[in-house]
Image: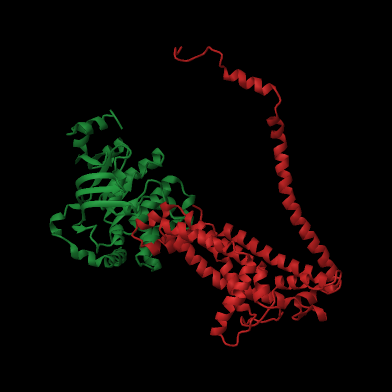
Chain colours: A green, B red
Amino acid sequence: MNETMEKQQKANVAIESKGKENRENKTNGAAEGNHVFEVEDLNLWYGSDQALYEINMQVPERQVTAIIGPSGCGKSTFLKTLNRMVEMVPIVKTSGDIKYRGDHIFANNFKQEYLRAKVGMVFQKPNPFPKSVYDNVAYGPRVHGIKDKKTLDQIVEKSLKDAAIWDELKDRLNENAYGLSGGQQQRVCIARALAVEPDVILMDEPTSALDPISTAKVEELVQELKKKYSIIIVTHNMQQAARISDKTAFFLNGELIEFAETDNLFQNPQDKRTEDYITGRFG
Amino acid sequence: MDKGLQTEGKLNVQNMIEKRMQTKTLGQSLEKIVPWFLLLCAIVSVLTTVGILFTLLRESIGFFSEVSIIDFYTGTEWSPWSGSFGVAPLIGGTLLITLIATITAVPLGLMAAIFLSEYASDKARRIIKPILEVLAGIPTVVYGYFALTFVTPIFQAIIPDLGIFNALSGGFVVGVMIIPMVASLSEDAMNSVPNALREGAYGLGATKHEVVFKVVLPAAFSGIVASIVLAISRAIGETMIVTIAAGATPSLTFNPTDSIQTMTAFIVQAATGDTSFGSTIYYSLYAVGITLFIFTLGMNLIAQYISRKFREEY
């Protein structure tokens, strides 16, 4: 067991070294112990269309934060801003600041690859690589320089176990991930994200393409994962947000309307628009 | 009943449809003829292929009754005007040209494809891709003179004892000719890799080149290999460039500075010269032709096999 830990640490060192210089623009890191992300006055434009307006939000550590809101309200855009994936669209412009554990993620010397190794992502549609289950999960560690077969074996096993899919797949590691069911593919994608041992996991409507049984499995998994990871999950399903999250943010037309403890937000919404939305008057 | 629904009135679409169904129109008879006509068009190209193959086989059999098939494929001297019909020098020439062309075209074409698909901005791609495809539209005879009058003098400046006719500049220009084929087909293969896969890799902290080389290229592998094999098959069959630039000296050599002769160049030489109908040389055209056909057919089969076998489904 000890040996596994040691190997895992080595894996982390490989990732850490990639972002070493990022540590230097850290601002009073001690104070932010409880928050993984601090978002200040974030605005975002696609060309000339503004998609996010003056977002201020602090994302807590080791909790599940749900983001709800009607289609097109900017919730997915906001999520992708947190690991800077939103910049894959070339016309995106941002203003304001986001700090990840005290580091300014928009700073010039901040490496996107470092951020994304720390902030993993699970997408709406399962997107395994057209490779074997093993190669899918081992992809991240390999990218970050881990080549030792035994270490990789251990990482793959541990990640698949953490994603609660090891028992189903332990005899099918060499099969192409495309042959799996949608629910299994999505959990392989979660295992792939876990394999680099991120700090935060972003989930963009991870169950919207899944059947109810697979959805239940993923929701159960999220509850397990929050013991170790901070999770931010976008969902259009309010029941899901109520079931699995600790805090909930309600977005509408690119604005953050309300952000509170999930129970409070659903039982005692402070804003009229939040109340209208969660009681089903629109959306 | 919904009061807004108009049930009465002179306009009745169903009546009109029924009326039309009862009368026979030109459209209905066309409906029956069209599939047959289309089938006929398909049969024409199939029949042409069968016809060519039949002619090749029949005339070759005529040739092999005069020259033993074993001598033809094992002989190492090709001088038909003095009666030696060993095809090896022509095959060797073809392979040498193909090898040089492949070495030229695959790296350049593949790099161009990677640039166009993964690195170029939309604007750059819109400008560069059509220009690249213009290369494919240049008549091969122009390429031939380009090789002879432009490329060869440059090579001669580098390699002093290079002759006017040599395999090097012929093969190089054949390579230039097939670059667009490799680049364009490989780019299509890379472009059809879903963006979700790239996002998945970026989401794990992969850098651009890690995404390109470890996700996009493997996913597009079968398409890329198929494009290369098709381009090679094109190089094997290329005629004008090698006829003009590579010489007419059938010699079994793997020295690229030598003058050689390919199978296609021999066919041109023999078909345009004063070869008399019915002579052994006349028939040897068909034997060389069928050998060439087997080579290109083999390459095409390999391309199909590879793209099936190594397909990464997505």
Depth order, front residue of A158/B39: B39
Image quarter hosting the N terminus of chain A: bottom left
Q: Position of residue A210 (x, y in %)?
A: 40, 41
Percent position (x, y) of residue B169?
60, 77
> Is A28 left or right of B292, judged from the image as shown?
left
**Residue most extreme to the bottom:** B161
Percent x, y of residue A54: 20, 45
- In percent of width and height, residue A266 lies at 22, 34
Q: Quadrant of the C terminus of chain A?
A: top left
* Left or right: A11 as drawn, with respect to B14: left
B9 relative to A166 in the view: left or right: right
Which residue sits at x=70%, y=81%?
Answer: B251
Looking at the image, which residue is at 65% across and 77% down? B246
Q: Is residue B168 above or below residue A52?
A: below
Residue at x 28%, y 39% (from the top left corner): A68
The number of numbered badges drawn on the structure is: 0
- Can residue A224 be seen from the camera position used here? no
Q: Nearer the viewer, residue B243 or A168?
A: B243
Q: Does residue B156 appear anywhere in the picture? A: yes
